[in-house]
Amino acid sequence: MSALPIDLDAFDAAPLTREPFPFLMVPHFVRQEAMGAINADYPLVTHPGSFPLPTLKYGPAFADLMKAIQGPEFTRAVERKLGVDLTGRPTMVTARGVSAARDGQIHTDSRTKLITVLIYMNNAWEAKTGRLRLLRGPGDLEDVIAEVPPEEGTLLIFKNEPNAWHGFHAFEGPRRVIQLNWVTDQGVVTREQARHKVSAFFKRLRGKGPGSTRM
């Protein structure tokens, strides 16, 4: 097994689509032999929403994945593929475990996010809904550039340009996805983590927040 739980060779080999905004997909970016241990150590997120890593508890295999996707090897690979310089750009990671009916509305990401990476950690996805769609505009979920099955270590990465529209038909239920962003500055990370920590605290008080797993 590779020292890394991610397949950098597959990432390097994947074709980059440049229009209408730069993106690429990599099936099995998370190595299949690593999936079982990572999913066993995945944070127990029982409420809809994105939760930053500092608010979560998780096991060592998941921690190894977090180190890999924020490490220098993957960062350099992203720079080469997208033609960007990420020197001095901090990373921010959140995890989701559940999708609610309100999720999936068409949107673009905040302009403080430079690059968005989504890594899906579900088994074979049979539902027709809950599949992220990259779109040509903000008005129609059927105006599709590409559809991303949220399964088995699939990666989607895109450059967060003003026209990077995406969304999905509503799905309720378990839907594991890790989001990694390179952002403009450390202040973005500090503000977002503070906001999410407050939200997670009140969700836990109501008994609806992410649960605990072994650390």
Image (cartoon, helix red, strand yellow):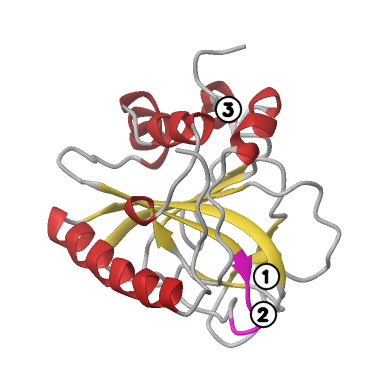
Residue closest to the far right: 126
- For the magenta stretch, what is the residue range? 98-102
Marks 1 and 3, the one that precedes in the sequence: 3
Question: Which residue is disc 2 drawn over?
Answer: 141
Residue at point 33%, 68% (across, down):
196
Does residue 191 appear to the left or right of 56 in the view shown? left
* Magenta span contains residue 191: no
Where, by quadrant of the figure, is residue 176 drawn?
Answer: bottom right
Task: Look at the numbered disc 1 and give the secondary structure of its residue.
Answer: strand
Q: Is residue 117 visible?
A: yes
Q: Which amino acid does label 3 sit on?
A: Ala
Q: Nearer the viewer, mark 1 or mark 2?
A: 2
| The N terminus: image quadrant | top right
In the rendered image, the quadrant that contains the C terminus is top left
Is residue 112 visible in this depiction of the protein? no
Q: x and y percent of residue 211 in the render?
A: 52, 59
Q: Helix or strand or loop: what does disc 2 sit on?
A: loop
Residue at the spot x=18%, y=37% of the render? 87
Query: Tag 2: Cα neighbours inside 10 Å, few (<14), some, or many (≥20)?
Result: many
Q: Residue at x 53, y 29 (%)?
A: 61
Q: Distance between the residues labelled 3 and 2?
A: 29 Å
Residue type marked 2: Leu
Nearer the observer, 142 or 110: 110
Q: Earlier in the sequence, mark 3 or mark 2?
A: 3
Residue on which disc 1 sits? 144
Q: Which residue is drawn at 42% across and 76% down?
A: 205
Residue bearing mark 3 = 13
Circle 3 SS class? helix
Alpha carbon separation for disc pair 1 and 2: 7 Å
Q: How far apart are labels 1 and 3 at the CA level?
A: 24 Å
The residue lying furthest to the bottom in this view is 139
Mark 1 vs 2: CB contact within 8 A: yes
